[in-house]
Amino acid sequence: MLDLLKQRFSGKRTAILGFGREGQSTYSLIRQVLPDQLLLIADQSDEISKHPLLSNDNHIEFHTGKKYLDVLGKCELVMKSPGVRINHLDPVFPPEKVFSQTSLFMERYGRQIIGITGTKGKSTTASLIHHIFKLAGKDSCLVGNIGSPAFHFTSLIGENTLIVFELSSHQLEYIEASPHVAVLLNLFQEHLDAYASFEKYQQAKLNIALYQRKDDFLVYHSSDELLASHIRVKEIAAHLFPFSLSAQNKPGIFLKGNTVFFSDGHTDTAVWEADQKRYLKGEHNLKNIMAAIGVCCLTGISNDEIREGILTFKGLEHRLEYVGEYRQIHFYNDSIATIPEATIEAVKSLPNVDTLILGGFDRGIDYSGLAAFLKLSGVRTLVLAGAAGKRIGECMASGPPHQQTIFYINRFDALKEIVFRETRPGFACLLSPAAASYDEFANFEERGKRFRELVKS
């Protein structure tokens, strides 16, 4: 990787765009090979000029504040962090001059990468695959959107290291190489505030497969009609391995009775019994498990190792996480659910959801389907927060009448009194917002942690 960085950026007027965790790790690695080259560091925060990492560096030009993106007119190349938007600018900065940790990782290590994307489920699926790899004794690292920036792992990657890379749409936007094994889980409306259209968001996700070679593999959900329609019309060179709960695709991963099979196109192999007890509850997690089974079979993991991995994987924080029982009420934290489809699956996965907490930052997502589902569900009480909560309430008020009692809150902390008063003993209270968190919180993790604190206090 160091040789590639030197080749790409030596002698070029380069800007590091965004100086959060990823921007800082980008700076540190570039400095290993280009210690004296001028770097332009751009960030909306004026405080980055005081960052201790930069205190002794005399070869930096800072561009901060509201007009920090003006740096694009003063540089030749850009190393962009995923959270920084430049696709809305006019004129457009030339895409061939935009690099990222993801694009360079794909270029350098693509043959070792298992890349996972989708609107929902990618963190769980990537973590499960990594868990199974480690149990099987494989040299594996988990990088990308889920944890530490990819550049943190460069010194640990050998020729046989399997790189499990969880990939967001922002990370995939400017790549020109795809992973050896790609996983596409689903496509739903998400991040509409960051893209000119839903189509642009979909295109970013599909980049994970568009640069694959003939000896690569694509595992994808064939029953997601939107996703499957793209696969049908795109010129994808990789071997296709669809997974589905209903269709028995060969080659592919499919369910027959209660058994998940992997087919290479010639032989169908029974891998795992889906009715076994597992920590990953719900039909959506069964799909995630099937995708993981496909990857593990393609990378030579034995059925026994796959079964042990599924059995012992306990899931992730803020993803249908059981918080505990307090005053005879069972509390679940599903703060990761930022779209209606995820919330619907959460309600379907848990028994006896009596109170559901929804809402937050409004990104213009269509909530009519969620409202129709809730009207027919057994949920008795809705606690609706923020601007998104108000829109969900409007959807509940239109069309057929609903039986739910609805409470509106302006501050997240106000939910505590309501849920303890309204939720019946022996039943469940679920936080599954179907909305982003950044009206009150920095991210969904912060929201989930606050929910746990409120419940436990």
Image (spheres, grey):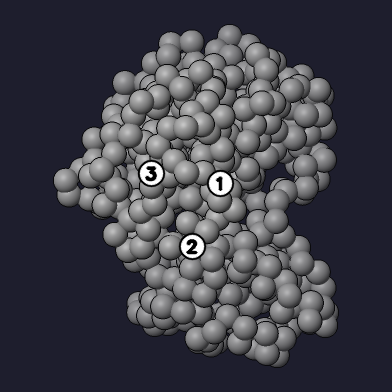
Q: Residue 191 in the image: x percent, y percent?
A: 39, 55
The image quarter in which residue 306 lies: top right
Residue in view at x 51 percent, y 79 percent: 385
Q: Mark 1 points at which residue?
A: 56
Q: Mark 2 points at which residue?
A: 47
Q: Mark 3 points at which residue?
A: 40
How many labels were placed on the picture? 3
Q: In this view, does 423 lie to the left or right of 397?
A: right
Who is closer to the viewer here, 439 or 268?
Answer: 439
Question: Split into 4 quadrants, where in the image is the C terminus?
Answer: bottom right
Q: Nearer the viewer's eye, disc 1 or disc 3?
A: 1
Instruction: Give the answer, above or below, for where 323 lies relative to 68.
Output: below
Q: Earlier in the sequence, mark 1 or mark 3?
A: 3
Q: Residue 68 in the image: x percent, y percent?
A: 33, 56
Residue in view at x 76 percent, y 63 percent: 322
Who is closer to the viewer here, 241 or 418?
Answer: 418
- Classed neighbour count for the residue bearing mark 1: other residues with Cα under 10 Å, few (<14), some (14–19), many (≥20): few
Q: Could you give the CA–CA distance between mark 1 and mark 3, rounded to whole angstroms?
A: 15 Å
Q: What element carries label 3?
A: strand
Q: Are marks 1 and 3 in contact (CB under 8 Å)?
A: no
Specify the amino acid type for callout 1: Asn
Q: Could you give the CA–CA distance between mark 1 and mark 2, rounded to whole angstroms?
A: 16 Å
| Residue 76: mark | none
Residue in view at x 42 percent, y 14 percent: 213
Q: Earlier in the sequence, mark 2 or mark 3?
A: 3
Q: Nearer the viewer's eye, disc 1 or disc 2?
A: 1
